[in-house]
Image (tube, grey):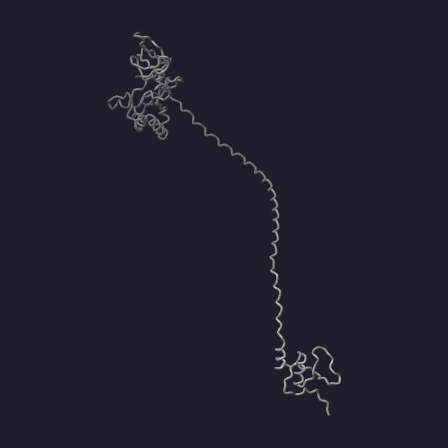
Amino acid sequence: MDDQPNAIPETDDEVKPESPADAARLETAEAGVEPVDLVGNDLDASEPQAEAVLEVEPGPEAELGAEAEPETEPEPEPEPEPETEPEPEPEPEPEPEPEPEPEPDPEPEPEPEPEPEPEPEPAPEPIEIPDDAEWYVVHTYSGYENKVKQNLEHRIESMGMLDQIFQVVVPIEEEVDIKDGQRRIVERKIFPGYVLVRMLLTDESWSVVRNTPAVTGFVGSGTDASDRLRPTPLREDDVRRIMRRMESDEPTIRVSFRTGQNVRIVDGPFNDFHGVVDEIDMERGKVRLMVNFFGRETPVELDFLQVEKV
């Protein structure tokens, strides 16, 4: 007989493989493939071996064998340890900024050369006043004396009358005003409402002065038409007296009381006594009163500041 591979006897009872290896042999036998030792044991050398091992899908018997094996529950995988957040690395301290190098001091700019001062304009040569020039009195509106002086000087210059009208003066003097026991120095017009003009009287000069705003006319003019152009000039002694009062260093004293008036003493040992003015000494600034003491009139000399008008 020819050698045949070992045939698995057919039995009515199904042979149950005892292990997965037996199940594999059974499958290969049914498929006509040489058995292969799946666990690494040597087979009988006399039995012919197939040249190649075919991969065979497991049949129903293998599935039955697999079902027979008790399923082993897979071991639970160990839970991974929670990752710990790495501690934040400390931020490196910022490097200190390098101090800026001090800027070099700027070179001082050269001082500009001072501009040469403009030469002052030469003062106009004083105009010689002729001997026949005289002083005339001009009447103005009250309170407009200084305004008339300013307007007239402007008209003289603009109209070219410097060689005929030479001086315009508002006579004023300093005065000590005593009121309510207080002393103050004020300027007072000697002749309110009047202005003095030194000029050569001609038709042109008369017209320039007369037509100045706020001027009402010349003092001393006649009523006739021919006399209006010939006002009377001031006398030399009157002019000197007026100028002397204006140039005086000692201010005059003005008081509000007169001789024979009743006054009250406001300072000194006789305070609140009443008396009658007997004499006023303007040069010394004293006043003499007749004060009644116990029925007798007694003279008392006081300063102007020590009395006031009742």
- Name the quadrant of the N terminus: bottom right
Q: Quadrant of residue 256?
A: top left
Left or right, 19 with respect to 167, comes to: right
Q: Residue furthest right?
A: 46
- Name the quadrant of the C terminus: top left
Which residue is more in the foreground, 265 or 210? 265
Q: Residue furthest bottom?
A: 1
Which residue is more in the foreground, 247 or 31? 31
Left or right, 44 with respect to 150, comes to: right
Left or right, 255 with respect to 115, comes to: left
Question: Residue at horizontal 29%, vertical 21%?
Answer: 219
Which residue is more in the foreground, 79 or 310? 79
Question: Residue at horizontal 53%, vertical 34%?
Answer: 114
Q: Residue furthest front?
A: 13
Q: Position of residue 57 (x, y in %)?
A: 63, 81
Question: Residue at horizontal 62%, vertical 68%?
Answer: 75
